[in-house]
Amino acid sequence: MKSKNDILRELLSDYQRRQEADRQEDEIRLQNAIGKCPEIGILQERKRDIIMDNVRRATFGEKTDESITEKMAALIARVKELLKTNGFPEDYLQPVYECDKCRDTGYIGDGIQEMCQCLKKRLYEDYGREMGLCERQKQTFQTFSLSVFPQEVIPDAGVSQRALMQVIKKRCEKFADDFPETQTDNLLLYGASGLGKTFLMHAIAHRVIERGYSVLIISAYRMFELMRRAHRDGDDAGLQPLFDAELLLIDDLGTEPMMENITVIQLFNLLNERAVRRLHTAVCTNLTPKELQERYTERVTSRLLDRQSTMQLYFAGRDIRLSER
Ligand SMILES: [Zn+2]
């Protein structure tokens, strides 16, 4: 698994290639324009000379040419005119950038440099993909729609499914927005399948990644598969991200095959070490607390169900995937 720094390094070399391509495109355009109208080449050179002359004067403390703005404006206007009469767009010789804000450097601001939005966006996309978010790119708080949840009151709960989801969504969003200063370190999302748990878990992941933290989202199935392999090979290196991510989201706990004691011990070690290091973990499961206890023993479950450290969100109601399709 690539680290965030690896991804940033790759992106920055991509930006460097892009700047190179921009300069080549500038040159090609200039040659095209000169090919059709040699005067444009002469005027462009004159512009460069005026600028260089002024730089020289400034360097040697000489008086700068006060008519420079005027001269430049006249040259620029003439070039535009010539471009137009030769069938080019007016701005054909403007430097080409994919992002005008950072001029394809990835950073903005003089002095203290800040990451440009375009780089940030790609960093989080690539990082999210690396962390397993690819198929669920669109599952965010913005795309989470309450209107798919029925409005009739759930008999046992005394509220409608929609009202319940509104509360749960709010809590999840607050958790993501407050991260890492969250009310509880951990989250447990439980209830039958098809009630929106996985969606909200991905929404949390997206938000926390956007806010610049390291997030790993993984299905319990895949996680235990990694653990089983590490156990077999006697090599734990591949498991490190599970222990290091600032937020670990485990989806569908309970669907993995049980491997005698190993599954339980490994889950306990993981949850325990993360708790000791005050790292945040969110778990999503179709099992009830009682079923969790039966499957993972009292010792593990007490970690998962401890109300001091874990906010429990119970999803109730009707499977919305069935009513949707
Ligand atoms: Zn940019």
Image (cartoon, rainbow, N blue to C red):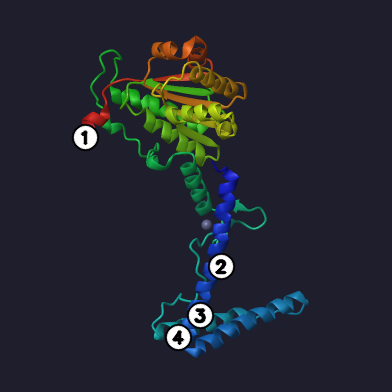
Residue at (35%, 39%) from the top-left corner? 143
Q: Is residue 236 left or right of residue 35?
A: right
Residue at (54%, 58%) from the top-left corner? 14
Q: Position of residue 240 (x, y in %)?
A: 58, 32
Which circle's residue, 3 or 2, is located before the other in the chain? 2
The residue at which mark 1 appears reads as: 325
Q: Is residue 21 above or below residue 146?
A: below
The residue at which mark 4 appears reads as: 82
Q: Nearer the viewer, mark 1 or mark 3?
A: 1
> Hey, what amino acid is under mark 4?
Leu
The residue at which mark 2 appears reads as: 20
Viewer-closest of 181 and 292? 292
Q: Position of residue 189 (x, y in %)?
A: 41, 23
Using the rendered view, name the quadrant where residue 201 is placed. Answer: top left
The residue at which mark 3 appears reads as: 30
Residue at (55%, 40%) from the top-left corner? 212
